[in-house]
Structure formats: structure tokens, C-alpha cells
Image (cartoon, rainbow, N blue to C red):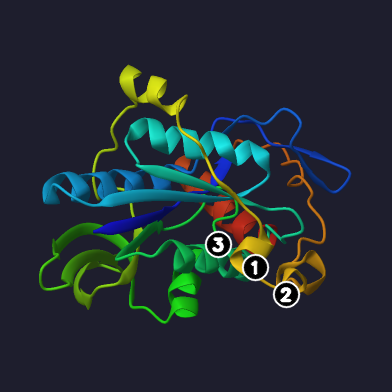
């Protein structure tokens, strides 16, 4: 089974985000593989190990620094990694990103596509479903359990819904997006880290993928960031003193007349 995993490089969740001149200052940001994508990588590796055959290919779109995200996936055990050069691509537009990723997946060839349910930077939760739509494939999101029957080319996924779980049956090929709880991602071994040094990471451009550059350019983006600003400073809190009955009355008055939330 050939599995393609879509991996995004995002700021470390512990990075303190700074705003400068109406945009996020990336000069001091530490970059990591998207945490939700780690569940997708782990699931792909487990499927390959269970079947005893197959191939796991990791794909990442963006500037040259995304090579590090690909190398990380390779150190975990992925067979191949491909860097999709993000020059001229509206990386903040989910549709543009999905268009490039879908073209890459189609070129690679696949039985299953896995990705995280969302990137922890923009939190769109749209790229996975868009890739499925562009490839005309079934899609199951927020997956926390997965069973595959490779011979029958079918699978069953458990996914989170409001107030419970949903069991979904699907045919392969398909696109699935992973949620926390699907598995416990492994750590890279020393052997895996050393092996990455010998790996060659192919670089694919838009021309290599047959993607019209104008269709995914910033000028054609369906979603654009106009401005970024830090949240307004909070006013100091107030402490109400006195008898409980009196403070309760005062609290209700403040919530109704000043905060206007009642």
C-alpha cells in the first residue's frame, strides 16, 4: 500500500509570536512539524508495518526550511520525502495550498492520503477536505480510530462528532485527517536520524506538477490576510468586597450595565 502523508511546517507551539508592521515577525520563530501531522505520520508507519509491505511518502509545501519537516518524518521511518517549492504560492490560502498538494499526490500515486486535521498556526482545517475534493475522493476527518482491509480496498474510521463518536466506512483510495488520540507518535531513533543524512529529498516546482502558477499566486488567493495586530490590553480586574449578598447584587449589576453580558 502506497501512503502519502501531507506535512506542514508550523511555528513551535511554545514560540512567543510577535507582531511587526502588520504581520507576524518570523525572524525568531522556531519551526517544527505540525503536531497533528505527527499522528498521520505515525499511522502511516503502523499501517506499513502491519501489512509488512508498502511505502510511506511525505510531502511538504513551502520555503526551503520545510526540508527540516521532511527530514524529521524520514527520521521517524518514512521511506521518501518530497519538498514542494512554495515560490509564488499563496501559502496562506487553503485552496492554493490544496491545489499544489493534490497535484503532487496525483503525480506520486497512492492508495491512501493522510494528514493532520488542521495546522496549529492558522487552524483552517480545510486543506485535507479540499485535497479530497480536488482528487474526487472520499474523505473522513477528525479520525481517532482506523481499520483497513487492504485486500478488499475498504476501511472503517471512527471520528469525533459533537457529543459522541461516528463510525464511517469508506473505499480506498481515500483522504483521512488525523485527530489527537489516533495513536501515540514515536520518537526518532539515532539510526533514523543518521539515515536521513543519506537521503536525497527531491524538489518539485509548480512546473514539475503541471500547476498553473497564476492560479495559486497571491493575487489569485481566495483568502488573504489584510492585517495582524495583537489583542488589546486588558483592563485591570475589580475585586468586590463586602457581604456576599451585597457583592452578588453588585456583580450582577456590573455584568448587566457595564459588561452588558446579561
Image location of residue 72, percent across then percent down: 45, 33
Mark 1 vs 2: CB contact within 8 A: yes
Residue 198, placed above or below residue 243: above
Q: Position of residue 145 (x, y in %)?
A: 19, 57
- Residue 116 position in % (x across, y down): 41, 54
Question: Which label is found at residue 230?
Answer: none
Is residue 49 rendered to the left or right of residue 23? Answer: left
Camera-nearest label, 2 or 3: 2
Q: For the point 35% across and 42% down, which residue is it?
A: 79
Residue at 68% in and 64% down: 207
Q: Residue at x 50, y 73 (%)?
A: 130
> Could you tell me how far apart the alpha carbons at marks 2 and 3 are, in whole angstroms?
20 Å
The residue that mark 2 highlights is 215
User: Which residue was labeled with disc 3?
Assistant: 124
- The crowd level at tag 1 (other Cα within 10 Å; few <14, some 14-19, many 20+) is many
Q: Quadrant of the C terminus?
A: bottom right
Quadrant location of the N terminus in the rendered image: bottom left
Q: Is residue 250 visible?
A: yes
Per the model, the C-alpha gap separating discs 1 and 3 is 13 Å
- Kindly identify which numbered label has been placed on residue 96: 1
Tell me whether the residue at label 2 lies in contact with that at label 3, contact meaning CB atoms closer than 8 angstroms: no
**Relative to 152, residue 158 above or below:** above
Of tags 1 and 2, which is closer to the observer?
2
User: Mark 1 and mark 2: span between their CA atoms?
Assistant: 8 Å
Q: Are marks 1 and 3 in contact (CB under 8 Å)?
A: no
Residue that extends furthest to the right in the rendered view of this protein: 21
At x 16% / y 69%, what residue is drawn?
A: 156
Q: Quick one: SS at disc 3?
A: loop
**Toward the viewer: 35 or 194?**
194
What crowding class fits label 2: few (fewer than 14 Cα within 10 Å), some (14-19), or many (20 or more)? some
Amino acid at each position: 500500500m502506497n501512503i502519502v502523508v501531507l506535512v506542514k511546517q508550523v511555528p513551535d507551539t511554545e514560540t512567543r509570536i510577535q507582531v511587526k508592521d502588520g504581520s507576524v515577525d518570523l525572524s525568531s520563530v522556531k519551526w517544527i512539524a505540525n503536531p497533528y501531522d505527527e499522528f498521520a505520520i505515525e499511522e502511516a508507519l503502523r499501517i506499513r508495518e502491519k501489512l509488512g509491505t508498502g511505502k510511506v511518502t511525505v510531502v511538504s509545501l513551502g520555503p526551503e526550511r520545510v526540508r527540516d519537516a521532511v527530514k524529521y518524518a524520514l527520521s521517524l521511518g518514512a521511506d521518501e520525502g518530497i519538498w514542494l517549492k512554495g515560490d509564488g504560492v499563496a501559502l496562506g490560502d487553503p485552496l492554493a495550498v490544496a491545489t499544489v498538494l493534490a497535484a503532487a499526490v496525483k503525480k506520486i500515486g497512492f492508495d491512501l492520503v493522510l494528514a493532520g486535521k488542521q495546522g496549529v498556526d492558522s487552524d483552517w482545517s480545510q486543506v485535507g477536505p479540499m485535497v479530497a475534493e480536488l482528487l474526487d475522493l472520499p474523505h473522513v476527518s477528525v479520525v481517532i480510530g482506523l481499520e483497513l482491509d487492504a485486500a478488499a480496498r475498504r476501511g472503517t474510521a471512527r471520528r469525533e462528532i459533537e457529543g459522541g463518536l461516528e463510525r464511517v466506512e469508506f473505499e480506498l483510495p481515500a483522504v483521512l485527517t488525523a485527530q489527537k488520540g489516533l495513536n501515540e507518535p514515536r520518537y526518532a531513533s539515532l539510526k533514523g536520524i543518521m539515515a536521513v543524512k543519506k537521503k536525497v529529498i527531491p524538489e518539485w516546482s509548480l512546473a514539475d506538477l503541471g500547476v498553473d502558477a497564476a492560479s495559486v499566486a497571491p493575487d489569485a488567493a481566495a483568502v488573504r490576510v489584510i492585517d495582524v495586530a495583537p489583542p488589546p490590553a486588558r483592563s485591570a480586574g475589580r475585586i468586590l468586597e463586602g457581604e456576599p449578598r451585597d457583592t452578588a447584587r453588585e456583580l450582577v449589576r456590573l455584568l448587566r450595565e457595564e459588561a452588558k453580558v446579561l
